[in-house]
Structure formats: structure tokens, C-alpha cells
Amino acid sequence: FIETILERPFISPRFFRILYKTMGNGHELVLDVGQTYTRLNTATGKRARTGQLKLHQWMLYVKVKQGSPKAIHSVSFKLHETFSPRQYVKSVATPDGYFATTQTSYGFFQASVK
């Protein structure tokens, strides 16, 4: 069980990664926890329920760099309280080893990954 709560604003315009080396279900895993970010232009951004323009498109992810994604039962992403739903749980990795959520937002916030 790994829990990461990022203490600084995580969903932000800069790229951020953390590498973990751990034992998962008896297997050594190397995990890459990070994000990708794209700023949208005002023509492609959509409005939030609050009316604010969502100009930040990002992906928050856990990628298995070494080991089998099958050693991970699930990855939970907990986002800001303004998201609905606020929590996303991924129990199956993509073929290239990613557990991820892709969203758009109008601001920066902290997120947790379990």
C-alpha cells in the first residue's frame, strides 16, 4: 500500500514526477507518479458549473516502470472538492502500464494518490 499526498499544488503548469521502488504483492515495482499538462486556448476551453473557463488540461498518473501492473490492485485519485465525482479509482492499467485520470480545470489544487 502506497499513499502519496502532494503537499504543494500538484495540478499546475509544470511537469512533476516521483519515482517509487516498493514491494507489491511480493513483486518489486518501480512506479512513476506524475502529471502531464496542456494549457487550452479560450476557443477550446469549456465552462465549469461555476461559469469559470477551464483552460488547464492534465493527466494525473501512476505508471509501472518496472514490474507487472497486475501487482497493483487499484489506484485511487482524490481531486479537489469542486470535482464531481471527486475520486477516481482505476483497477486496470492501460496496455502501456498507466493508471490515470485526464481532466480539465480552471485552477490549481492539491491531489492525493493511493
Image (spheres, rainbow, N blue to C red):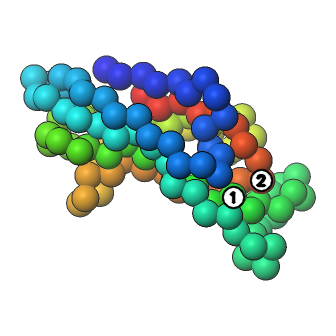
Whole-percent x, y for residue 71 in the image: 18, 35
Q: In the displayed structure, does residue 33 sit left or right of residue 71?
A: right
Whole-percent x, y for residue 55 in the image: 74, 62
Which image quadrant for residue 43? Answer: bottom right
Whole-percent x, y for residue 70 in the image: 17, 41
Residue in view at x 76 percent, y 68 percent: 46
Q: How far apart are marks 2 and 1 (CA)?
A: 6 Å
Q: In the displayed structure, does residue 14 sit left or right of residue 62?
A: right
What amino acid is found at the position of numbered circle 1 in the picture? His
Can residue 82 be seen?
Answer: yes
Near-viewer residue (59 or 93): 59
Residue assigned mark 2: 106
Near-viewer residue (93 or 13): 13
Which image quadrant for residue 82? Answer: top right
Residue in view at x 60 percent, y 38 percent: 10
Vertical side of 29 occupied by 94: above or below: below
Answer with mark 2 or mark 1, whichever residue precedes in sequence.
Answer: 1
Residue assigned mark 1: 56
Which image quadrant for residue 1? Answer: top left
Mark 2 Cα shell of 10 Å, populated few (<14), some (14-19), many (≥20): some
Q: Is the Cβ of the residue at disc 2 closer than 8 Å to that at disc 1?
A: yes
Count of labels in the image: 2
